[in-house]
Protein backbone atom coordinates (compact mmCIF):
# COMPACT_ATOMS: atom_id res chain seq x y z
CA UNK A 1 0.00 0.00 0.00
CA UNK A 2 1.64 3.29 -1.13
CA UNK A 3 1.47 6.53 0.87
CA UNK A 4 -0.71 9.51 -0.07
CA UNK A 5 1.06 11.18 -2.96
CA UNK A 6 1.95 14.77 -2.10
CA UNK A 7 2.06 15.86 -5.73
CA UNK A 8 -1.19 17.77 -6.24
CA UNK A 9 -1.47 16.69 -9.87
CA UNK A 10 -1.30 13.02 -8.97
CA UNK A 11 -3.92 13.52 -6.28
CA UNK A 12 -6.19 15.27 -8.75
CA UNK A 13 -5.92 12.36 -11.17
CA UNK A 14 -6.68 9.85 -8.43
CA UNK A 15 -9.70 11.79 -7.19
CA UNK A 16 -11.08 12.30 -10.66
CA UNK A 17 -10.68 8.62 -11.40
CA UNK A 18 -12.55 7.57 -8.27
CA UNK A 19 -15.45 9.93 -9.00
CA UNK A 20 -16.08 9.76 -12.71
CA UNK A 21 -13.59 8.00 -14.92
CA UNK A 22 -14.84 4.45 -14.48
CA UNK A 23 -18.53 5.16 -14.92
CA UNK A 24 -18.61 4.72 -18.70
CA UNK A 25 -17.71 1.09 -19.31
CA UNK A 26 -16.92 1.74 -22.99
CA UNK A 27 -14.76 4.81 -22.39
CA UNK A 28 -10.98 4.58 -22.57
CA UNK A 29 -9.79 5.91 -19.21
CA UNK A 30 -6.47 4.06 -18.90
CA UNK A 31 -3.56 3.87 -21.28
CA UNK A 32 -1.28 0.83 -21.24
CA UNK A 33 2.40 1.25 -20.51
CA UNK A 34 4.03 -1.98 -21.64
CA UNK A 35 6.94 -2.73 -19.37
CA UNK A 36 8.75 -4.36 -22.24
CA UNK A 37 9.87 -7.70 -23.54
CA UNK A 38 12.66 -9.24 -21.49
CA UNK A 39 15.55 -10.52 -23.59
CA UNK A 40 16.53 -13.36 -21.27
CA UNK A 41 13.16 -15.00 -20.70
CA UNK A 42 9.68 -15.53 -22.09
CA UNK A 43 7.21 -14.42 -19.41
CA UNK A 44 7.09 -11.29 -17.25
CA UNK A 45 4.65 -10.70 -14.43
CA UNK A 46 3.76 -7.43 -12.68
CA UNK A 47 4.38 -6.93 -9.00
CA UNK A 48 3.87 -3.61 -7.17
CA UNK A 49 4.90 -0.18 -8.47
CA UNK A 50 5.37 3.16 -6.76
CA UNK A 51 3.78 6.51 -7.61
CA UNK A 52 6.65 7.33 -10.00
CA UNK A 53 5.85 4.22 -12.05
CA UNK A 54 8.87 2.22 -10.90
CA UNK A 55 7.70 -1.39 -11.01
CA UNK A 56 8.91 -4.67 -9.59
CA UNK A 57 8.63 -7.47 -12.16
CA UNK A 58 9.01 -11.24 -11.98
CA UNK A 59 10.09 -13.39 -14.90
CA UNK A 60 10.26 -17.06 -15.77
CA UNK A 61 11.02 -19.50 -18.61
CA UNK A 62 14.65 -18.47 -19.01
CA UNK A 63 16.30 -18.92 -22.40
CA UNK A 64 19.53 -20.91 -22.64
CA UNK A 65 19.22 -22.43 -19.19
CA UNK A 66 22.80 -23.26 -18.05
CA UNK A 67 22.58 -27.04 -17.82
CA UNK A 68 25.82 -28.50 -16.44
CA UNK A 69 26.15 -31.50 -18.72
CA UNK A 70 29.43 -32.65 -17.16
CA UNK A 71 27.45 -33.84 -14.13
CA UNK A 72 25.27 -36.19 -16.22
CA UNK A 73 26.26 -39.76 -17.15
CA UNK A 74 25.14 -42.20 -19.83
CA UNK A 75 22.28 -43.51 -17.70
CA UNK A 76 21.00 -39.97 -17.23
CA UNK A 77 21.01 -39.28 -20.96
CA UNK A 78 19.18 -42.54 -21.63
CA UNK A 79 16.62 -41.57 -19.00
CA UNK A 80 16.15 -38.17 -20.66
CA UNK A 81 15.60 -39.81 -24.04
CA UNK A 82 13.02 -42.19 -22.56
CA UNK A 83 11.27 -39.32 -20.77
CA UNK A 84 10.97 -37.36 -24.01
CA UNK A 85 9.76 -40.40 -25.97
CA UNK A 86 6.97 -41.05 -23.49
CA UNK A 87 5.95 -37.39 -23.13
CA UNK A 88 6.47 -35.45 -26.36
CA UNK A 89 3.03 -36.14 -27.85
CA UNK A 90 1.38 -34.40 -24.92
CA UNK A 91 3.78 -31.44 -24.65
CA UNK A 92 3.07 -28.42 -26.83
CA UNK A 93 5.79 -27.28 -29.26
CA UNK A 94 8.29 -30.02 -28.36
CA UNK A 95 9.30 -33.03 -30.44
CA UNK A 96 11.06 -36.25 -29.54
CA UNK A 97 14.83 -36.03 -28.97
CA UNK A 98 16.34 -34.70 -32.21
CA UNK A 99 20.09 -35.37 -31.87
CA UNK A 100 21.02 -37.76 -29.08
CA UNK A 101 24.76 -37.68 -29.84
CA UNK A 102 24.86 -33.89 -29.71
CA UNK A 103 22.88 -33.99 -26.47
CA UNK A 104 25.41 -36.35 -24.87
CA UNK A 105 28.20 -34.08 -26.07
CA UNK A 106 26.63 -31.15 -24.21
CA UNK A 107 25.59 -29.32 -27.37
CA UNK A 108 21.85 -30.05 -27.64
CA UNK A 109 19.35 -28.58 -30.03
CA UNK A 110 16.89 -26.14 -28.51
CA UNK A 111 14.25 -28.88 -28.47
CA UNK A 112 16.54 -31.28 -26.63
CA UNK A 113 17.71 -28.59 -24.19
CA UNK A 114 14.07 -28.01 -23.26
CA UNK A 115 13.70 -31.72 -22.48
CA UNK A 116 16.76 -31.72 -20.20
CA UNK A 117 15.40 -28.76 -18.22
CA UNK A 118 11.97 -30.42 -17.90
CA UNK A 119 13.63 -33.66 -16.78
CA UNK A 120 15.68 -31.85 -14.13
CA UNK A 121 12.54 -30.10 -12.87
CA UNK A 122 9.96 -32.86 -13.04
CA UNK A 123 11.93 -36.08 -12.58
CA UNK A 124 15.01 -35.10 -10.57
CA UNK A 125 13.72 -32.02 -8.74
CA UNK A 126 13.67 -33.77 -5.35
CA UNK A 127 17.03 -35.50 -5.74
CA UNK A 128 20.07 -33.64 -4.38
CA UNK A 129 22.35 -35.54 -6.74
CA UNK A 130 21.11 -33.38 -9.64
CA UNK A 131 21.30 -29.75 -10.68
CA UNK A 132 18.35 -27.64 -9.54
CA UNK A 133 16.17 -25.38 -11.69
CA UNK A 134 14.81 -22.18 -10.12
CA UNK A 135 13.90 -20.48 -13.39
CA UNK A 136 12.59 -17.32 -11.73
CA UNK A 137 14.40 -13.98 -11.85
CA UNK A 138 13.72 -10.62 -10.28
CA UNK A 139 13.59 -7.47 -12.38
CA UNK A 140 12.77 -3.81 -11.93
CA UNK A 141 11.53 -1.14 -14.32
CA UNK A 142 12.78 2.20 -13.04
CA UNK A 143 11.91 5.10 -15.28
CA UNK A 144 8.78 3.61 -16.80
CA UNK A 145 9.94 2.89 -20.35
CA UNK A 146 10.26 -0.63 -21.83
CA UNK A 147 14.00 -0.21 -22.35
CA UNK A 148 14.52 0.60 -18.66
CA UNK A 149 13.87 -2.96 -17.53
CA UNK A 150 16.72 -4.23 -15.35
CA UNK A 151 17.02 -7.98 -15.88
CA UNK A 152 19.95 -8.30 -13.50
CA UNK A 153 18.50 -7.59 -10.06
CA UNK A 154 20.58 -10.48 -8.78
CA UNK A 155 20.23 -11.36 -5.14
CA UNK A 156 22.17 -14.38 -3.89
CA UNK A 157 22.66 -16.42 -7.04
CA UNK A 158 26.27 -17.25 -7.95
CA UNK A 159 28.14 -18.20 -11.09
CA UNK A 160 29.45 -21.67 -11.77
CA UNK A 161 33.20 -22.00 -11.30
CA UNK A 162 35.11 -20.89 -14.37
CA UNK A 163 32.05 -19.41 -16.11
CA UNK A 164 29.95 -16.25 -16.21
CA UNK A 165 26.75 -18.31 -15.96
CA UNK A 166 24.55 -17.85 -12.90
CA UNK A 167 23.17 -21.13 -11.59
CA UNK A 168 19.54 -20.00 -12.14
CA UNK A 169 18.67 -22.37 -9.30
CA UNK A 170 17.17 -19.56 -7.23
CA UNK A 171 13.64 -18.18 -7.01
CA UNK A 172 14.17 -14.42 -6.84
CA UNK A 173 11.18 -12.09 -6.42
CA UNK A 174 11.22 -8.34 -5.96
CA UNK A 175 7.72 -7.69 -4.62
CA UNK A 176 7.72 -3.90 -4.78
CA UNK A 177 9.49 -0.54 -4.67
CA UNK A 178 8.28 2.11 -2.24
CA UNK A 179 8.00 5.81 -3.03
CA UNK A 180 11.07 6.21 -0.84
CA UNK A 181 13.02 3.85 -3.11
CA UNK A 182 13.14 0.83 -0.80
CA UNK A 183 12.86 -2.39 -2.79
CA UNK A 184 11.92 -5.64 -1.09
CA UNK A 185 10.93 -9.23 -1.64
CA UNK A 186 11.96 -12.83 -1.12
CA UNK A 187 14.68 -14.98 -2.62
CA UNK A 188 16.51 -18.26 -2.13
CA UNK A 189 20.14 -19.26 -1.86
CA UNK A 190 21.61 -21.05 -4.91
CA UNK A 191 22.10 -24.79 -5.19
CA UNK A 192 25.80 -25.40 -5.83
CA UNK A 193 27.71 -28.62 -6.46
CA UNK A 194 29.60 -29.61 -3.33
CA UNK A 195 33.02 -31.26 -3.26
CA UNK A 196 32.95 -34.90 -4.32
CA UNK A 197 31.80 -37.19 -1.53
CA UNK A 198 33.19 -40.73 -1.45
CA UNK A 199 30.85 -43.23 0.21
CA UNK A 200 31.81 -46.30 2.22
CA UNK A 201 31.89 -48.42 -0.96
CA UNK A 202 34.36 -46.07 -2.62
CA UNK A 203 31.79 -44.55 -5.02
CA UNK A 204 31.94 -40.84 -5.67
CA UNK A 205 28.91 -38.51 -5.48
CA UNK A 206 28.30 -34.84 -6.10
CA UNK A 207 25.47 -33.31 -4.08
CA UNK A 208 23.76 -30.01 -4.99
CA UNK A 209 23.16 -28.12 -1.76
CA UNK A 210 22.16 -24.63 -0.69
CA UNK A 211 22.85 -22.71 2.48
CA UNK A 212 19.22 -21.85 3.23
CA UNK A 213 15.78 -21.70 1.63
CA UNK A 214 13.63 -18.61 1.26
CA UNK A 215 14.72 -15.38 2.93
CA UNK A 216 13.05 -11.99 2.98
CA UNK A 217 15.18 -9.02 1.96
CA UNK A 218 15.14 -5.25 1.57
CA UNK A 219 17.43 -2.76 -0.14
CA UNK A 220 17.76 1.01 0.14
CA UNK A 221 19.84 1.33 -3.05
CA UNK A 222 18.11 -0.74 -5.76
CA UNK A 223 19.95 -3.94 -4.97
CA UNK A 224 23.48 -2.62 -4.61
CA UNK A 225 23.35 -3.76 -0.99
CA UNK A 226 20.88 -6.47 0.06
CA UNK A 227 19.81 -6.93 3.67
CA UNK A 228 18.31 -10.22 4.88
CA UNK A 229 15.58 -10.75 7.42
CA UNK A 230 16.91 -13.77 9.29
CA UNK A 231 14.21 -16.26 10.37
CA UNK A 232 13.35 -16.79 14.03
CA UNK A 233 14.08 -20.54 13.62
CA UNK A 234 16.82 -21.87 11.32
CA UNK A 235 17.47 -25.43 12.55
CA UNK A 236 17.65 -28.29 10.03
CA UNK A 237 17.59 -26.37 6.75
CA UNK A 238 18.10 -22.68 7.39
CA UNK A 239 14.51 -21.73 8.15
CA UNK A 240 12.20 -19.53 6.07
CA UNK A 241 11.33 -15.85 5.98
CA UNK A 242 9.65 -13.47 3.56
CA UNK A 243 9.13 -9.71 3.19
CA UNK A 244 5.80 -9.22 1.42
CA UNK A 245 5.06 -5.52 1.96
CA UNK A 246 6.60 -2.29 3.25
CA UNK A 247 4.68 0.84 4.26
CA UNK A 248 5.44 4.46 3.41
CA UNK A 249 5.66 5.85 6.94
CA UNK A 250 8.61 7.80 8.31
CA UNK A 251 9.36 4.74 10.44
CA UNK A 252 9.61 2.14 7.67
CA UNK A 253 7.87 -1.10 8.60
CA UNK A 254 8.01 -4.37 6.67
CA UNK A 255 5.73 -7.36 7.16
CA UNK A 256 5.83 -10.96 6.03
CA UNK A 257 6.41 -14.24 7.82
CA UNK A 258 9.12 -16.37 9.39
CA UNK A 259 9.64 -19.90 10.59
CA UNK A 260 9.36 -19.99 14.38
CA UNK A 261 9.29 -23.72 15.13
CA UNK A 262 10.50 -26.94 13.50
CA UNK A 263 7.79 -29.52 12.92
CA UNK A 264 8.19 -32.45 15.30
CA UNK A 265 7.38 -34.90 12.51
CA UNK A 266 10.25 -33.44 10.47
CA UNK A 267 12.60 -33.63 13.44
CA UNK A 268 11.63 -37.27 13.87
CA UNK A 269 12.49 -37.93 10.19
CA UNK A 270 15.90 -36.27 10.57
CA UNK A 271 16.77 -37.92 13.88
CA UNK A 272 15.46 -41.37 13.00
CA UNK A 273 18.17 -43.96 13.68
CA UNK A 274 16.57 -46.37 11.23
CA UNK A 275 16.48 -44.68 7.84
CA UNK A 276 17.01 -41.10 8.98
CA UNK A 277 20.07 -38.89 9.23
CA UNK A 278 20.96 -40.48 12.60
CA UNK A 279 21.31 -43.84 10.86
CA UNK A 280 25.07 -44.48 10.56
CA UNK A 281 24.53 -46.59 7.45
CA UNK A 282 23.34 -43.35 5.78
CA UNK A 283 25.45 -40.70 7.55
CA UNK A 284 28.38 -40.90 7.08
CA UNK A 285 28.35 -44.07 4.96
CA UNK A 286 26.28 -42.71 2.04
CA UNK A 287 26.35 -38.92 2.43
CA UNK A 288 27.24 -36.04 4.72
CA UNK A 289 24.85 -34.81 7.40
CA UNK A 290 24.23 -31.60 5.39
CA UNK A 291 23.32 -33.65 2.32
CA UNK A 292 21.01 -35.91 4.32
CA UNK A 293 19.16 -32.95 5.84
CA UNK A 294 18.78 -31.36 2.41
CA UNK A 295 17.50 -34.61 0.89
CA UNK A 296 15.05 -35.12 3.75
CA UNK A 297 13.73 -31.58 3.36
CA UNK A 298 13.28 -31.91 -0.40
CA UNK A 299 11.44 -35.21 -0.10
CA UNK A 300 9.55 -34.52 3.10
CA UNK A 301 5.82 -35.27 3.08
CA UNK A 302 5.32 -33.28 6.30
CA UNK A 303 5.43 -29.55 6.96
CA UNK A 304 9.02 -28.61 7.79
CA UNK A 305 8.46 -25.33 9.62
CA UNK A 306 5.66 -23.64 11.51
CA UNK A 307 5.49 -20.04 10.29
CA UNK A 308 4.36 -16.84 11.99
CA UNK A 309 3.60 -13.33 10.73
CA UNK A 310 6.44 -10.91 11.35
CA UNK A 311 6.87 -7.17 11.60
CA UNK A 312 10.27 -5.59 11.02
CA UNK A 313 11.22 -1.97 11.61
CA UNK A 314 13.85 -1.20 8.97
CA UNK A 315 16.84 1.10 8.73
CA UNK A 316 19.45 1.66 5.99
CA UNK A 317 22.16 -0.02 8.04
CA UNK A 318 20.45 -3.37 7.54
CA UNK A 319 19.71 -4.12 11.18
CA UNK A 320 15.94 -4.53 11.32
CA UNK A 321 14.13 -4.84 14.63
CA UNK A 322 12.00 -7.94 14.06
CA UNK A 323 9.04 -9.08 16.15
CA UNK A 324 6.45 -11.81 15.98
CA UNK A 325 2.86 -10.76 15.34
CA UNK A 326 1.33 -13.90 16.84
CA UNK A 327 -1.20 -16.57 15.90
CA UNK A 328 -4.98 -16.44 15.64
CA UNK A 329 -5.37 -19.42 17.99
CA UNK A 330 -3.49 -20.82 20.95
CA UNK A 331 -3.26 -24.59 20.33
CA UNK A 332 -3.28 -27.27 23.00
CA UNK A 333 0.25 -28.03 24.30
CA UNK A 334 0.00 -31.55 22.85
CA UNK A 335 -1.12 -30.32 19.42
CA UNK A 336 1.91 -30.73 17.15
CA UNK A 337 0.15 -29.71 13.96
CA UNK A 338 1.54 -26.60 12.25
CA UNK A 339 -0.46 -23.51 13.18
CA UNK A 340 0.71 -20.56 11.15
CA UNK A 341 0.04 -16.91 10.36
CA UNK A 342 1.11 -14.55 7.57
CA UNK A 343 1.14 -10.76 7.14
CA UNK A 344 0.66 -9.54 3.56
CA UNK A 345 0.31 -5.76 3.88
CA UNK A 346 0.80 -2.87 6.33
CA UNK A 347 -0.40 0.73 6.34
CA UNK A 348 1.25 3.93 7.59
CA UNK A 349 -0.15 3.38 11.10
CA UNK A 350 1.60 0.01 11.30
CA UNK A 351 -1.65 -1.97 11.11
CA UNK A 352 -1.07 -5.19 9.18
CA UNK A 353 -3.39 -7.71 7.51
CA UNK A 354 -3.02 -11.23 6.19
CA UNK A 355 -4.36 -14.61 7.20
CA UNK A 356 -3.89 -17.25 9.87
CA UNK A 357 -4.96 -20.79 10.71
CA UNK A 358 -8.04 -20.92 12.90
CA UNK A 359 -10.59 -23.27 14.44
CA UNK A 360 -13.70 -24.26 12.53
CA UNK A 361 -15.65 -23.11 15.57
CA UNK A 362 -14.53 -19.54 16.17
CA UNK A 363 -15.93 -19.56 19.73
CA UNK A 364 -13.46 -22.19 21.02
CA UNK A 365 -11.26 -20.87 23.82
CA UNK A 366 -10.06 -24.14 25.36
CA UNK A 367 -9.07 -26.32 22.39
CA UNK A 368 -8.33 -30.03 22.52
CA UNK A 369 -5.19 -31.57 21.06
CA UNK A 370 -7.19 -32.51 17.93
CA UNK A 371 -9.39 -29.42 17.71
CA UNK A 372 -11.01 -29.09 14.27
CA UNK A 373 -9.00 -26.75 12.04
CA UNK A 374 -9.54 -26.88 8.28
CA UNK A 375 -9.17 -23.32 7.07
CA UNK A 376 -7.15 -20.14 7.28
CA UNK A 377 -8.95 -16.89 7.94
CA UNK A 378 -8.38 -13.23 7.06
CA UNK A 379 -6.96 -11.33 10.03
CA UNK A 380 -5.79 -7.89 11.10
CA UNK A 381 -2.74 -7.47 13.35
CA UNK A 382 -3.52 -4.49 15.54
CA UNK A 383 -2.56 -3.27 19.01
CA UNK A 384 -0.88 -6.57 19.81
CA UNK A 385 -3.91 -8.64 18.80
CA UNK A 386 -4.65 -11.01 15.93
CA UNK A 387 -8.28 -10.31 15.05
CA UNK A 388 -10.39 -12.62 12.89
CA UNK A 389 -12.18 -10.64 10.16
CA UNK A 390 -14.46 -13.48 9.06
CA UNK A 391 -17.07 -13.30 11.80
CA UNK A 392 -19.17 -16.43 12.26
CA UNK A 393 -17.44 -19.30 10.43
CA UNK A 394 -20.58 -21.28 9.59
CA UNK A 395 -21.15 -21.63 5.82
CA UNK A 396 -17.78 -19.97 5.13
CA UNK A 397 -14.46 -21.34 3.98
CA UNK A 398 -10.97 -19.90 3.79
CA UNK A 399 -10.31 -16.19 3.49
CA UNK A 400 -7.32 -13.89 3.03
CA UNK A 401 -6.73 -10.17 3.43
CA UNK A 402 -4.23 -8.90 0.84
CA UNK A 403 -4.03 -5.17 1.44
CA UNK A 404 -5.04 -2.32 3.76
CA UNK A 405 -5.13 1.42 3.15
CA UNK A 406 -4.37 4.23 5.54
CA UNK A 407 -8.06 4.57 6.47
CA UNK A 408 -8.00 0.98 7.74
CA UNK A 409 -10.02 -0.54 4.89
CA UNK A 410 -8.75 -4.08 4.24
CA UNK A 411 -9.45 -6.12 1.10
CA UNK A 412 -9.15 -9.74 0.03
CA UNK A 413 -11.36 -12.73 -0.70
CA UNK A 414 -13.50 -15.23 1.17
CA UNK A 415 -15.04 -18.56 0.15
CA UNK A 416 -18.81 -18.53 0.62
CA UNK A 417 -21.58 -21.02 -0.02
CA UNK A 418 -23.53 -19.84 -3.08
CA UNK A 419 -26.23 -21.97 -4.71
CA UNK A 420 -25.02 -25.00 -2.81
CA UNK A 421 -21.36 -24.73 -3.79
CA UNK A 422 -18.20 -22.89 -2.64
CA UNK A 423 -17.42 -19.66 -4.49
CA UNK A 424 -14.55 -17.27 -3.77
CA UNK A 425 -15.71 -13.63 -3.52
CA UNK A 426 -13.77 -10.40 -3.05
CA UNK A 427 -14.48 -8.33 0.04
CA UNK A 428 -13.61 -5.14 1.84
CA UNK A 429 -13.90 -4.45 5.56
CA UNK A 430 -13.40 -1.56 7.94
CA UNK A 431 -10.82 -2.68 10.52
CA UNK A 432 -11.12 0.48 12.65
CA UNK A 433 -14.49 -0.43 14.17
CA UNK A 434 -14.82 -2.46 17.39
CA UNK A 435 -14.24 -6.19 16.93
CA UNK A 436 -17.88 -7.12 17.39
CA UNK A 437 -18.89 -4.67 14.63
CA UNK A 438 -16.51 -5.96 11.96
CA UNK A 439 -18.42 -7.03 8.84
CA UNK A 440 -17.08 -8.20 5.49
CA UNK A 441 -18.78 -6.55 2.52
CA UNK A 442 -18.85 -8.64 -0.67
CA UNK A 443 -20.01 -6.47 -3.60
CA UNK A 444 -21.40 -7.87 -6.84
CA UNK A 445 -18.76 -8.92 -9.35
CA UNK A 446 -18.95 -10.49 -12.84
CA UNK A 447 -21.70 -12.99 -11.91
CA UNK A 448 -22.86 -14.96 -8.87
CA UNK A 449 -20.72 -18.03 -9.57
CA UNK A 450 -17.57 -16.10 -10.49
CA UNK A 451 -14.51 -16.58 -8.29
CA UNK A 452 -13.02 -13.14 -7.61
CA UNK A 453 -10.42 -11.54 -5.40
CA UNK A 454 -9.13 -8.04 -4.65
CA UNK A 455 -5.36 -7.71 -4.40
CA UNK A 456 -4.94 -4.02 -3.55
CA UNK A 457 -6.66 -0.82 -2.46
CA UNK A 458 -5.46 2.79 -2.55
CA UNK A 459 -6.36 5.71 -0.32
CA UNK A 460 -9.06 6.91 -2.72
CA UNK A 461 -11.00 3.67 -2.14
CA UNK A 462 -10.21 2.12 -5.53
CA UNK A 463 -9.59 -1.63 -5.50
CA UNK A 464 -8.15 -3.91 -8.18
CA UNK A 465 -8.10 -7.66 -8.64
CA UNK A 466 -9.37 -10.36 -10.95
CA UNK A 467 -12.39 -12.56 -11.44
CA UNK A 468 -13.76 -15.30 -13.68
CA UNK A 469 -15.69 -14.11 -16.72
CA UNK A 470 -16.73 -17.52 -18.13
CA UNK A 471 -19.52 -19.70 -16.78
CA UNK A 472 -18.70 -23.24 -17.94
CA UNK A 473 -17.85 -26.03 -15.52
CA UNK A 474 -14.11 -25.71 -15.33
CA UNK A 475 -11.46 -28.41 -15.25
CA UNK A 476 -7.69 -28.57 -15.29
CA UNK A 477 -7.73 -28.69 -19.09
CA UNK A 478 -10.50 -26.14 -19.46
CA UNK A 479 -10.24 -23.42 -16.79
CA UNK A 480 -12.40 -20.34 -16.80
CA UNK A 481 -10.91 -17.22 -18.33
CA UNK A 482 -10.24 -14.37 -15.92
CA UNK A 483 -10.21 -10.59 -16.31
CA UNK A 484 -8.81 -7.79 -14.19
CA UNK A 485 -11.24 -5.34 -12.66
CA UNK A 486 -11.36 -2.06 -10.77
CA UNK A 487 -13.95 -1.44 -8.05
CA UNK A 488 -14.80 1.92 -6.48
CA UNK A 489 -16.16 1.48 -2.96
CA UNK A 490 -17.38 5.10 -2.93
CA UNK A 491 -20.17 4.48 -5.42
CA UNK A 492 -20.17 0.67 -5.74
CA UNK A 493 -18.88 0.71 -9.34
CA UNK A 494 -17.35 -2.53 -10.66
CA UNK A 495 -15.70 -2.52 -14.12
CA UNK A 496 -13.70 -4.93 -16.27
CA UNK A 497 -10.36 -3.18 -16.91
CA UNK A 498 -10.36 -4.49 -20.46
CA UNK A 499 -13.31 -2.13 -21.05
CA UNK A 500 -11.30 0.89 -19.91
CA UNK A 501 -8.38 0.83 -22.36
CA UNK A 502 -8.30 2.39 -25.85
CA UNK A 503 -10.05 0.45 -28.62
CA UNK A 504 -6.80 0.05 -30.53
CA UNK A 505 -5.23 -1.94 -27.70
CA UNK A 506 -8.14 -4.20 -26.75
CA UNK A 507 -7.25 -6.79 -29.37
CA UNK A 508 -3.57 -6.70 -28.39
CA UNK A 509 -3.79 -6.91 -24.60
CA UNK A 510 -6.05 -9.26 -22.64
CA UNK A 511 -5.65 -8.13 -19.02
CA UNK A 512 -5.94 -11.20 -16.81
CA UNK A 513 -5.27 -9.78 -13.37
CA UNK A 514 -4.35 -6.61 -11.50
CA UNK A 515 -1.90 -6.82 -8.64
CA UNK A 516 -1.60 -3.30 -7.29
CA UNK A 517 -2.94 0.27 -7.39
CA UNK A 518 -1.18 3.24 -5.85
CA UNK A 519 -2.33 6.72 -4.93
CA UNK A 520 -1.35 8.11 -8.32
CA UNK A 521 -3.94 5.72 -9.79
CA UNK A 522 -1.29 3.56 -11.50
CA UNK A 523 -2.35 -0.08 -11.73
CA UNK A 524 0.12 -2.98 -11.89
CA UNK A 525 -1.33 -5.70 -14.09
CA UNK A 526 -0.49 -8.72 -16.20
CA UNK A 527 -1.87 -9.24 -19.69
CA UNK A 528 -1.73 -11.84 -22.43
CA UNK A 529 -0.06 -10.62 -25.63
CA UNK A 530 0.77 -12.44 -28.85
CA UNK A 531 4.47 -12.46 -29.75
CA UNK A 532 6.90 -14.28 -32.02
CA UNK A 533 7.51 -17.83 -30.83
CA UNK A 534 11.02 -18.55 -29.55
CA UNK A 535 12.66 -21.85 -28.69
CA UNK A 536 14.51 -22.81 -25.50
CA UNK A 537 17.59 -20.95 -26.74
CA UNK A 538 15.64 -17.78 -27.51
CA UNK A 539 15.80 -18.20 -31.28
CA UNK A 540 12.81 -17.41 -33.50
CA UNK A 541 10.78 -20.38 -34.71
CA UNK A 542 9.57 -20.11 -38.31
CA UNK A 543 6.80 -21.73 -40.31
CA UNK A 544 7.26 -23.42 -43.69
CA UNK A 545 7.21 -20.06 -45.47
CA UNK A 546 9.88 -18.59 -43.22
CA UNK A 547 7.52 -16.37 -41.22
CA UNK A 548 7.76 -16.33 -37.41
CA UNK A 549 5.28 -18.53 -35.58
CA UNK A 550 3.22 -16.85 -32.88
CA UNK A 551 2.37 -17.67 -29.28
CA UNK A 552 0.63 -16.05 -26.32
CA UNK A 553 2.73 -14.97 -23.35
CA UNK A 554 2.01 -13.04 -20.16
CA UNK A 555 3.51 -9.57 -19.94
CA UNK A 556 3.85 -7.05 -17.11
CA UNK A 557 2.01 -3.82 -17.85
CA UNK A 558 1.06 -0.62 -16.07
CA UNK A 559 -2.30 1.11 -16.52
CA UNK A 560 -2.06 4.89 -16.33
CA UNK A 561 -5.15 7.10 -15.91
CA UNK A 562 -6.00 9.25 -18.92
CA UNK A 563 -8.84 11.62 -19.84
CA UNK A 564 -11.96 10.02 -21.32
CA UNK A 565 -11.65 10.25 -25.11
CA UNK A 566 -15.32 9.32 -25.77
CA UNK A 567 -14.12 6.65 -28.20
CA UNK A 568 -16.71 4.11 -29.34
CA UNK A 569 -15.26 0.64 -29.96
CA UNK A 570 -16.38 -1.93 -32.49
CA UNK A 571 -18.02 -5.13 -31.27
CA UNK A 572 -14.74 -7.02 -31.76
CA UNK A 573 -12.69 -4.40 -29.93
CA UNK A 574 -15.23 -4.31 -27.13
CA UNK A 575 -14.66 -8.02 -26.54
CA UNK A 576 -18.05 -9.20 -27.75
CA UNK A 577 -16.42 -11.50 -30.29
CA UNK A 578 -14.49 -14.57 -29.16
CA UNK A 579 -10.76 -14.06 -29.47
CA UNK A 580 -8.72 -16.51 -31.48
CA UNK A 581 -7.17 -19.37 -29.53
CA UNK A 582 -3.57 -19.09 -28.45
CA UNK A 583 -0.76 -21.34 -29.53
CA UNK A 584 0.18 -22.04 -25.92
CA UNK A 585 -3.37 -22.43 -24.68
CA UNK A 586 -5.20 -20.48 -22.02
CA UNK A 587 -5.06 -23.38 -19.58
CA UNK A 588 -1.27 -23.31 -19.69
CA UNK A 589 -1.23 -19.57 -19.11
CA UNK A 590 -3.55 -19.90 -16.13
CA UNK A 591 -1.25 -22.58 -14.76
CA UNK A 592 1.59 -20.08 -15.09
CA UNK A 593 -0.46 -17.42 -13.30
CA UNK A 594 -1.15 -19.89 -10.48
CA UNK A 595 2.54 -20.72 -10.30
CA UNK A 596 3.43 -17.08 -9.84
CA UNK A 597 0.72 -16.70 -7.28
CA UNK A 598 2.59 -19.36 -5.37
CA UNK A 599 6.02 -17.93 -5.92
CA UNK A 600 5.12 -14.29 -5.27
CA UNK A 601 3.61 -15.07 -1.91
CA UNK A 602 5.54 -18.28 -1.19
CA UNK A 603 2.89 -19.51 1.15
CA UNK A 604 0.20 -21.69 -0.40
Image (cartoon, rainbow, N blue to C red):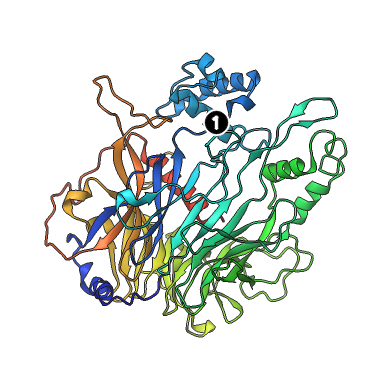
User: Where's residue 260, x and y in %?
Assistant: 69, 63
Judging depth in this view, the residue of 448 and 398 nearest the camera is: 398
Residue bearing mark 1: 67
Q: Position of 390 compared to 37: left or right?
A: right
Q: Which secondary structure lies at badge 1? A: loop
User: Quadrant location of the C terminus?
Assistant: bottom right
Specify the farthest residue to the front. 162
User: Where's residue 491, x and y in %?
Assistant: 28, 75
Residue 124 seen in the figure: yes
Judging depth in this view, the residue of 390 and 215 nearest the camera is: 215
Which of the 4 image quarters holds residue 448? Answer: bottom left
User: Where's residue 242, x and y in %?
Assistant: 57, 60
Judging depth in this view, the residue of 408 and 14 nearest the camera is: 14
Judging depth in this view, the residue of 482 and 502 nearest the camera is: 502
User: Where's residue 11, x and y in %?
Assistant: 28, 75
Residue 390 seen in the figure: no
Q: Position of 255 compared to 583: left or right?
A: right
**Compared to 319, does 525 lie above or below?**
above
Amino acid sequence: MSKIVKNIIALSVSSALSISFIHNVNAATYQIIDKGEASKLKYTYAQQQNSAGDMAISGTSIYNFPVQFDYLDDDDFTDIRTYALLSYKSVHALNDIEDFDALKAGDPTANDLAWVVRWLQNIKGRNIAYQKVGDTIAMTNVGGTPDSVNEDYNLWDETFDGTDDLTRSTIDIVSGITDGGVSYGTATAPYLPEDVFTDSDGEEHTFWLREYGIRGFFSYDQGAQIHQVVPFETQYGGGESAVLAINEAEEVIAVGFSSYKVSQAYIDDIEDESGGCADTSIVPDQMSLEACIAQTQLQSTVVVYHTMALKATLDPSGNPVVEQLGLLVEPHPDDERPHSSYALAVNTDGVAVGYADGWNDETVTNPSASQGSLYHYAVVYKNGEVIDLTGVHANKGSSRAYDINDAGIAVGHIVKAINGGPVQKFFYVNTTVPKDEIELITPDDFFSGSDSTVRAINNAGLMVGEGEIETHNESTLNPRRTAAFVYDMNDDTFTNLNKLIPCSTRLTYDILEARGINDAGLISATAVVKVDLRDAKGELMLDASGSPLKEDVVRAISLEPMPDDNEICTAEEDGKLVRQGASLGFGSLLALISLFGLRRKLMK
